[in-house]
Amino acid sequence: MAKLLEVKNLSVSFMTGYGEVQAVRDVSFSLEEGEVLAVVGESGCGKSVLCRSIMKLLPGSASIKNGQILLDGADITRYRERDMQRLRGRMFSMIFQDPMTALNPTLTIGRQIAEAVQAHEPKISKTALQKRVAELMTLVGIDQPEARAGLYPHNFSGGMRQRSVMAIALASNPRLLFADEPTTALDVTIQAQILDLLREIQQKLGTAAVLVSHDLGVVARAADRVAVMYAGKIVEIGTAEEIFYEPRHPYTWGLLRALPSFAKDGEPLYTIPGMPPTLINPPRGDAFAERNEYALAVDYEEMPPMFRITDTHFAATWLLDERAPEIVPPVGGGWNGR
Amino acid sequence: MADDILLSVRHLTHCFRLSKRQVLRAVDGISFDVQRGEIFGLVGESGSGKSTVARCVMNILRPTQGEILFNGVNVCDAAQRRANKKMLQTQRQIIFQDSASSLNPRMTAAEIIAEPMQINHITTPRGSCRAEAEFQLHYVGMDASYLDKYPPELSGGMRQRVAIARALSMEPELLVADEPIASLDVSIQAQIINLFKHLQEEHGFTFLFIAHDLAVVRYLCDRAAVLYHGKIVELAPTAELFSNPCHPYTKALLSAIPIPDPRKERARPLVKFDGKGLRGEGRLEEVSAGHLVWKEAET
């Protein structure tokens, strides 16, 4: 399969009154055609900034310090706004977290989807436009599209709104879809439906997707590969099976153990101690060392490199070094009757 | 047995008037009891009336019909409410979902926590308001360095702790928690859940816990009621509810809990609930001890 997106050593910083915030630090990953990559981490770890920096939707205070973004082999790192506009929509589009604020409350749903279609095909005829809008609404699972197109966002429930936002994002057949916490504002039942829909669309249209979430449980349903981010860095990346069944990084262990589904009766839930570090002056060694109960002395001194476990599975922790002591991971290794 | 019941909701109905002709029955004749020292869960999708129940219990909304007995006092009755004003205002406390908007951004954590004591003219058992605030902050797992912080300086989990500390400063009998963890990260959620569990086990607080996340409810609650379109469709002890769900809507809800296991999760079909069998009249029937399920009346 061809590599659709390749990010090499990307670093993004924000200039603030308190100093330089290193939101994304030396991140590298690649995405193949038709693949779903989930990016998981706590709030403030740089997940959203990573997505926005690839789409170049960052505010003026942010700048790409280092690294390359390759789209279809072409380096778009230094693209200007005008070139980016040509790519947005056609190459990639984005679904935002809150469907309430992503839609215009004064326009009908049909009008808003039509607007997205027209932006890319300005000469489309009225009947063709209506047909395309109905087609998009059916694609995202809104039935009776002709009747529903005349309704306003406030007539729709949260799940329906998120479906409309997806229809807008898919209006010009993007090859890459960024979904920034698409289900966080939704109920459990709707959440599962939206994830299934995302998976279905991805299989039907062959769209690749980057799914951002803070909940590892959510990601299991939709993702092919999972990247775990902490303090602006990817600390572990691998296929969904590898991350869930054989996690290697202590932070991934912590995220998994914090889920109530893992709790045994009567035992308190595991919590990751402490707080994420500020990214103004990130610690010299491993940023997670302070909160890591398995931390080694070297963790405080030197940043761990990405250790290769299999061809697809990488993790940045000194525990994988051959000199490190053996540690029995608290989760993983066939814990779920595998 | 009657003494054990702290909160009793009887045939509660609340209607919102949307326009001259349209009336929305957000809560439709529901009844349940919350016993002293238990965590009672209210579960349902958005729009099922969970928060409306919480707001009626807190006297924020006035129910259209029905009564709510708290400690034997009918909180819907103006005369009884006036006679027991202080008890009602101190013994019931609520924690809202969004801590960013429920805390005054111009007050420090210490002022926020001490405010209910000043309003209710309670003599502080630990000397000063500040000492009291420090004690409550410590109680929810934060140290004194946070006393002079303003809410925007705190992270989501910390803010939610301040909101909990504010509610606890009255040492209430009943804590109503309206989706307190929905806006938090998974790792922070675990901290707040542990805190709730600790408060109940060690200090005997009673919770009315509102959530849409069933994995949390299974872990935390002793009993839970499932709401659908303003009606309770199933009410049972949590273990019973999860091992033996009877109503199709409960089954649909249970099937939607994400399992952090990619192979199992992908293989698992979603159960859809179309709302059939919930249009007309009906009533709750007991299928086993303490397990009530909605049965539609034959027509």
Image (spheres, coloured by chain):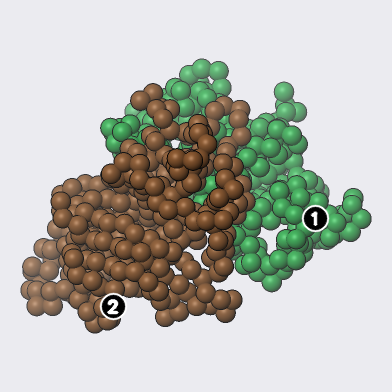
Q: Are marks 1 and 2 in contact (CB under 8 Å)?
A: no
Where disc 1 sits, the SS reads helix
Front residue of B244 and A87: A87
Question: How many numbered marks appear?
Answer: 2
Left or right: A208 in relation to A54: left
Relative image position of residue B176 (x, y in whole percent)? 64, 45
Q: Type of residue at label 1?
A: Glu
Quadrant placement of the C terminus of chain B: top left
Looking at the rendered structure, the kind of residue marked 2 is Arg
* Picture coordinates of residue A301, whole percent (x, y): 56, 56
Asked whether A124 or A243 is in front, the reply is A243
Query: Residue B234 placed where, x, y %?
Result: 47, 30
Instruction: Please rate how many residues cluster around mark 1, counting C-alpha atoms within 10 Å: few if below 14, some from 14 to 19, many from 20.
Output: many
Q: Residues within 10 Å of mark 2 (few under 14, many from 20)?
A: few
Q: Give the chain ID for the brown colour.
A: A
Query: Taking B280 as reference, is A280 above or below it?
Result: below
Closest to the observer, A28 or B68: A28
Under circle 2, the secondary element is: loop
At a point 19% along the width and 70% down the height, the residue shown is A74
Q: At 72% across and 68% down in the image, what residue appears?
A: B107
Q: Colour of chain B?
A: green
Q: What residue sits right under mark 1 in the picture?
A: B134
Instruction: Give the spatial CA distance, label 1 vs label 2.
Output: 52 Å
- In the rendered image, residue A196, in percent from the top left (x then y), is placed at 28, 44
Circle 2 is placed at which residue position? A78
| Residue B288 shows in this picture | yes
Q: In which quarter of the image is the N terminus of chain B?
A: top right
Q: Chain under label 2? A: A
Q: In this rendering, which labeled residue sits more in front, label 1 or label 2?
A: 2
